[in-house]
Amino acid sequence: MQQIKMMKEDIIRRLCETHHLSRREDPSELYRVLRTVGFQSPDEHSLGIALCARMKDPMALDLTDAKLLCTVGVRSAVRTIRTDEWTVFNKPFFPASEEELTHMISGATELLAPLGMRAVHWLHMTVDLLSQVLSERSLAKRELGIALASEAADLMDAATREIWTWPSVLFRGQTLGETLMRFLLPVASFAVPLRLRFDRQLGGFHYSLAKDVDVDAASDYPVRRFLHAYGPADRDAYALWAGISAAHATRHWEQIPQEELAQVEFEGKQSWMLVQDTHMESADPEGIRFIGPFDPLLRIPHRSLLIRGKQQYRYFFRSSGKPGMVLSDGTCVAGWHIRRKKRSWTMLLEDIGGPIGRLAVDELEQEARRLEPVFGSRCDGVSFLR
């Protein structure tokens, strides 16, 4: 196995290149940009923000004709991938055992005890019912959970059906069955391709079947994609990224031939990356990028590559109200938020102790205005919060 030592600067340069943040890409490169690891897109703006940071003219892209799939991905996150990449980022994560499944739905274990059946029984029932319930319609998440629970109840004996309709111990206003179905839904989406469409009035997503997905298409290994996007990394980092057990991660990791991996020494630890990536030529990142709080770059295992100290960690990776990150030549220099008005908005830049003061205001405003089509209104400029 090849062994190498890498410096922080080399890894940052490679990661910016891999995540298409070193230079703007032509519209024809959209598929290649998406292919890295897709984009987490839990709201109507996240995908647009990610594309603005990477594409020369992102608003010129005709996304309605692009073969994109907004679906449920790893860690139950809403993600946008290429339609033909479902067999890479979804299908391999379907659990192969009771142990793998219970790790993925650990919060629902107390719901299973009174039902007296293994979790895999309910998972396979959910998979079967999902295709039936959504065969000719789309439903919001709450409606889908209720419909799945109702259809499942029709298949039970009277005693089990009574338990199924008990009030949920986890969520008020739900039955035990509905809550369990909602826990199992993200896992079932690794067997049944789903398409999510954001509804602005609903403030959430409608679920339907993604009938244009070829579930039997050839697939790349997800570990290979993970290491390309986030290496150097190790098996534990892969398990954390995917939200799977150590045994599940090991099963995936062992699919990669050892000769494809290079052992890397970084920050006193041993990690791995793909041998082919050790030969990758990476340009120095240039210019300003506003990346959103759900950007895939922020999922790197070694967050010390982007931030400095516990204060910046708490600022960027808090549980709610997460800010975006301002990159200048690949270096984190500030955080950003949007302050909305009736017909416009202002980009608020927050000082986190980086060299934000060295950047030209007109360059920051020019980059901020690239987001106008994303938010559907005019940018009034940037404002600095100290």
Image (cartoon, helix red, strand yellow):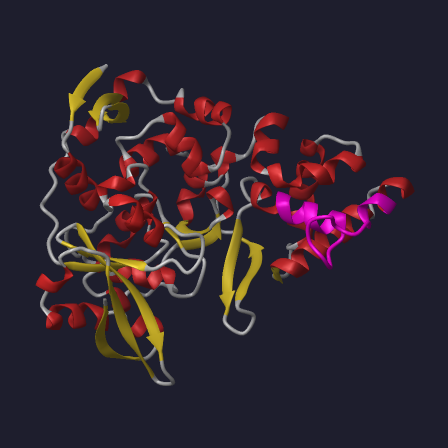
Range of residues picked out in magenta:
162-184
Q: How many marks?
A: 0
Instruction: Judge from the rendering whether residue 292 lies leftward or rightward of residue 368; answer left or right.
Output: right
Q: Which sits in the foreground, 323 or 185? A: 323
Residue, far right: 158
Residue at image coords 15%, 42%: 13
Q: Is residue 180 magenta?
A: yes
Residue 221 in view in this figure: no
Residue 172, percent across and down? Answer: 71, 57
Residue at image coords 16%, 36%: 8
Instruction: Judge from the rendering whether residue 240 lies leftward or rightward of residue 361; answer left or right.
Output: right
**In the figure, residue 207 lies in which quadrant?**
bottom right
Residue, far bottom: 342
Q: Is residue 170 magenta?
A: yes
Q: Which sits in the foreground, 263 or 58? A: 263
Residue at image coords 29%, 41%: 303
Instruction: Judge from the rendering whether residue 47 lies leftward or rightward of residue 72; answer left or right.
Output: left
Q: Is residue 46 above or below residue 130?
A: below
Residue 50, percent across and down? Answer: 30, 58
